[in-house]
Amino acid sequence: MVSDNFIPYEGVTYSPEETAKRSQSYYDYMDKRRTVRAFSAKPIDKKIIENILMTASSAPSGAHKQPWTFCVISNADLKAKIKVAAEKEEYDSYNGRMSEEWLEALAPFGTDWHKPFLEIAPYLIIVFKKAYDLKDGVKSKNYYVNESVGIAVGFLLSAIHNAGLVSLTHTPSPMNFLQKILNRPENERAFLLIPVGYPAADIQVPDIERKPAEEVIVYYE
Ligand SMILES: Cc1cc2nc3c(=O)[nH]c(=O)nc-3n(C[C@H](O)[C@H](O)[C@H](O)COP(=O)(O)O)c2cc1C
């Protein structure tokens, strides 16, 4: 069925050689992305943040509902408030809420309940998922909300990396304190907290390996 509100597709296609080259160079580039846990306070132009967020918002979503809100925190008082609340949750998690197995899995990353980066990074992006839409008090359904918001965050992390910036995908669980501090409406739930900035000087990252193709891909030919 062709609806009368369709428009020509304007995407670009390449020769097979160019396609191979681009797929390889993009993989090589993305494979250099790393999570960092120490940031520089060097400021970043707001327009840059808006560009990376609009890249995230270009992601596909169930029934094109775009069920996300990106809250961008640069206000120092709010960052301090978020740090206090996040560290409280993290303290409880590291001191009893997380299983031994979980703590063991985290050991190689050297993390603990201290989260100084929440005040140092120039921006905290808090991604909220919209469990349902709420306009003028009227509720309507969203579809595949977790899948959609997860994909948008993938776009976001790749846009941050592409801009030469770094991020941390942070989950100070449970995250409902963010909904309260930021005064978000009842249909929004905090999904991820992502500090963005330049890396701290001389930063080190955990020496991890990524699974090889044979472990993550199954071909049926
Ligand atoms: C959903 C999700 C939640 C995460 N939560 C945290 C977190 O709360 N704190 C943290 O330090 N890292 C967190 N990470 C980062 C992972 O530890 C990191 O992505 C992983 O070790 C792989 O490292 P890489 O991102 O450098 O490839 C999280 C990552 C994801 C995808």
Image (tube, grey):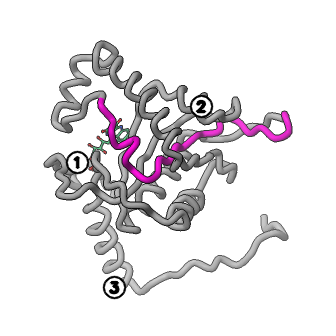
Which residue, given by chain and number where applicable, does mark 1 sit on? 215
Q: Amino acid at mark 1?
A: Glu
Q: CA distance from mark 2 to mark 3?
A: 48 Å
Q: CA distance from mark 3 to mark 1?
A: 27 Å
**For residue 179, which quarter of the picture?**
top right
Q: Amino acid at mark 2?
A: Gln
CB atoms of marks 3 and 1 within 8 Å? no
Q: In this picture, which residue range is highlighted in magenta? A: 114-137
Which residue, given by chain and number where applicable, does mark 2 sit on? 179
- Residue labelled 3 has its Cβ within 8 Å of some atom of ligand 1: no
CB atoms of marks 2 and 1 within 8 Å? no
- Residue labelled 2 has its Cβ within 8 Å of some atom of ligand 1: no
Q: CA distance from mark 2 to mark 1?
A: 38 Å
Which residue, given by chain and number where applicable, does mark 3 sit on? 17
The N terminus - image quarter: bottom right
From the viewer's perspective, is residue 22 above or below residue 214? below
Tell which quarter ligand 1 is in. Answer: top left
From the viewer's perspective, is residue 109 above or below residue 97? below
Tell which of 55 and 70 is nearer to you: 70
Expressed as whole percent of the image width and height from the top left, the position of residue 65 reads: 69, 49
- x 32%, y 63%: residue: 30
- x 17%, y 46%: residue: 206
Expressed as whole percent of the image width and height from the top left, the position of residue 107 reads: 17, 31
Tell which of 109 and 11 is nearer to you: 109
- x 58%, y 40%: residue: 128
